[in-house]
Amino acid sequence: AQSVTQLDSHVSVSEGTPVLLRCNYSSSYSPSLFWYVQHPNKGLQLLLKYTSAATLVKGINGFEAEFKKSETSFHLTKPSAHMSDAAEYFCVVSDPTGTYKYIFGTGTRLKVLA
Amino acid sequence: GAGVSQSPSNKVTEKGKDVELRCDPISGHTALYWYRQSLGQGLEFLIYFQGNSAPDKSGLPSDRFSAERTGGSVSTLTIQRTQQEDSAVYLCASSTRQTLHNEQFFGPGTRLTVL
């Protein structure tokens, strides 16, 4: 069975400092992994996705994530946080067995301090 | 271009009433998903439609929940005899085709409050 674990429910950083949001996955198959962001009262927006083409994946708004099979991790990073990054972030794995439905992590709420 | 749209954006209802939530997927997307986002349960899968195939209803929490997709496009999620635990944001997503790596595009959701 597929699953993802987001290790931190809340992360606070100061504006201009690096962001690290942690995600570990469990999958019987070579996984397809995604990071989505949800701003308050908005829909989910795709930040980036891992599809096995490259282990370092670059996304929108300066975010990137590195797939590490040995550590079963797919952590999301950004070199310098901006106030507009404050939102909830979801790590997602796609279920490979038929429907490709999403299995979501519990989310990490990022707070950016001025 | 137009994204996934959902209506209504907010719905307040009384316990025991039926509600219908609508989703308009992106034109040409054959796969359509419903998810529920609630405080206690996080984001969970409800139901999946792919073209003319039988839907995957494995995520529906009870037989009070049902969904249909007419003409391979618009979908309606119906909750009968609503309960307070049905209060949540209901999200619809669509995707171009059924592959492992295809991203899903989400609508803004319908916030359902059951009094």
Image (cartoon, rainbow, N blue to C red):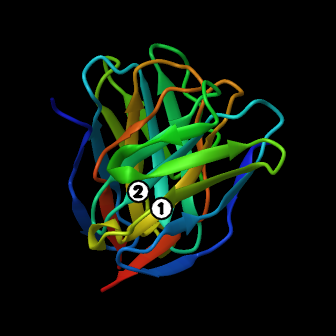
Report the residue at 37% width, 60% height from top: A38
Query: Residue shown at 25%/21% (left/top)?
Result: B27
Residue type for callout 2:
Val
Left or right of B80 in this view: B41: right
- What is the three-letter code of the residue carrying label 1? Tyr
Q: Where, by quadrant of the figure, is residue B81 drawn? A: bottom left
- Counting residues from the start of the chain, the first of labels 1 and 2 encountered is 2
Considering the numbered disc 1 on the image, is that residue within a helix, a strand or a loop? strand
Q: Residue at x 30, y 16 (%)?
A: B28
Label 2 sits on residue: A37
Q: Residue B104 at what x, y percent from top left?
A: 43, 35
Q: Would residue B39 appear left or right of B70 to someone viewing this image?
A: right
Front-most of B108 and A44? A44
Task: Report if the CB atoms under discs 1 and 2 are less than 8 Å apart.
Answer: yes
Instruction: State the residue lying farthest toward the top.
Output: B52
Q: Which mark is drawn over residue B112?
A: none
The residue where tag 1 is placed is A89
Crowd around label 1: few <14 · some 14–19 · many ≥20 (10 Å): many
